[in-house]
Amino acid sequence: MLTYLRKWPLHQILFTGANALKQIFTFSLELAGGQGNPALANEATAIAISVLTQDVDCFKQWDVLYKEHLEASVALLKKLVDEWKDHSLKLSSSSSDTLTVKHAMNSFRMKNEKAITEGVANLSLYKEADQSCKLISRRLSRGPGIAPLTAMVIAAGAAAAGGVVGWSRTLSILPI
């Protein structure tokens, strides 16, 4: 069933509504927890990540389900970290997408820190999740949008400096 679902073009599902993607994400997250079937868990994790990259609003859905599906959330976070180069452009394609992902990571981190401070039973999972959240947050902060912005600022500065030099040359040539 999951192999069939994975082959389904997710961009077509977008036209049936965001609700369908949220349902697929929820279903995938439930299966990504493993429960004795690593192949199924890996497949479900891949589907969940595919849905997240198709519609970053699914991060909001994930935030609601995070603690309930902690083991699956850890698997998803680890896979996002491991495959960051493959998914980063889609996850940070606009400032609002980046903000949505950052908000989810911050929310996850707050939940992780609270659980770690309280010393809950599955402490190691929260610590693992927190490490992945930190890495993703760090990578989002220096994301692909910063380099072009820096290049534009430098180019604008160089153009302005060239303009000032040009004006000073013009002024020095003019008779006083």
Image: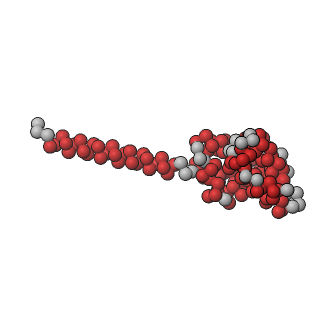
Which residue reaches farthest bottom?
Answer: 39
Tell me, what colour scheme is on the image? secondary structure
Q: Going by the image, does 150 lie left or right of 171? A: right
Asked where in the image residue 61 lies, by quadrant, the reply is top right
Residue 96 % position (x, y): 61, 40
Q: Going by the image, does 160 lie left or right of 56? A: left
Asked where in the image residue 38 lies, by quadrant, the reply is bottom right
Query: Residue at point 11% right, 36% down?
Result: 176
How many numbered callouts? 0
Closer to us: 71 or 95: 95
In the image, residue 112 above or below residue 81 = above
Q: Quadrant of the N terminus?
A: bottom right
Q: Going by the image, does 110 lie left or right of 146? A: right
In the image, residue 141 above or below residue 81 = above
Which residue reaches farthest right?
Answer: 36
Query: Residue at point 46% right, 48% down?
Result: 150
Closer to us: 14 or 50: 14
Query: Residue at point 67% right, 57% down?
Result: 81
Closer to us: 20 or 86: 20
Residue 40 % position (x, y): 83, 59
Residue 85 % position (x, y): 62, 58
Which residue reaches farthest top?
Answer: 176
Q: Going by the image, does 38 lie left or right of 76? A: right
Residue 163 visible to the viewer:
yes
Residue 115 visible to the viewer:
no
Residue 141 % position (x, y): 58, 48
Query: Residue at point 43% right, 47% down?
Result: 152
